[in-house]
Image (cartoon, rainbow, N blue to C red):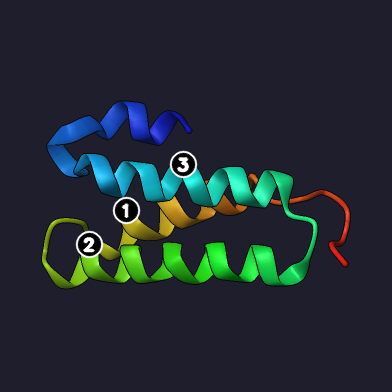
Amino acid sequence: LRRLESVGASKLHQPEQARIRDAADTLVLAVTLDDARAALEDLDALCERLVETGRWTEESAAELAQDVLACGPLAPVK
């Protein structure tokens, strides 16, 4: 995720970066819909918190979410 490299620690704390990477990895490797859903729910919660605390704009958070969604499986999960 290039966005993580570009924003770095100035906008995301290390645990937040790890959550985003975990979500992306989970989507790449998702075997079931439940796996993907849990990752997306956590990502959504993180994005909401970043916006609510004023650390990120809604636009930036939406772009981050789209970047992670792009890591999703090309074929439907079971």
Q: Residue at x 33, y 63 (%)?
A: 47
Count up the numbered dots: 3
Q: Nearer the viewer, mark 3 or mark 2?
A: 3
Q: Amino acid at mark 2?
A: Leu
Alpha carbon separation for disc pair 3 and 1: 17 Å
Compared across the picture, whether 60 is left or right of 39 comes to left
Amino acid identity at mark 1: Ser
Which element carries disc 2, helix, strand or loop?
A: helix
Mark 3 and mark 2 lie on one chain; the one further toward the N terminus is 3
State the residue position of label 3: 21
Q: Nearer the viewer, residue 34 or 50?
A: 34
Task: Please say if 34 is above or below 73.
Answer: below
The residue drawn where x is 22% and y is 60% is 57
Could you say which quadrant of the image residue 11 lies in? top left
Q: What is the number of the mark on residue 8?
A: none
Position of residue 29 measured from the top left corner of the image (x, y, whole percent): 72, 46
Q: Secondary structure at mark 1?
A: helix
Q: Residues within 10 Å of mark 2 (few under 14, many from 20)?
A: some
Percent coordinates x, y for residue 3 in the rendering:
39, 35
The residue drawn where x is 20% and y is 56% is 56
Q: Looking at the rendering, in which quadrant would you find the C terminus?
A: bottom right
Mark 3 or 1: the one toward you = 3
| Circle nearer the N terminus (2, 1) | 2
Q: Which residue is mark 1?
A: 60
Q: Quadrant of residue 44?
A: bottom left
Tell me the amino acid under the disc marked 3: Arg
Are the residues tagged 2 and 1 within 8 Å (C-beta)?
yes
Look at mark 2 in the image and give the residue it sits on. Answer: 50
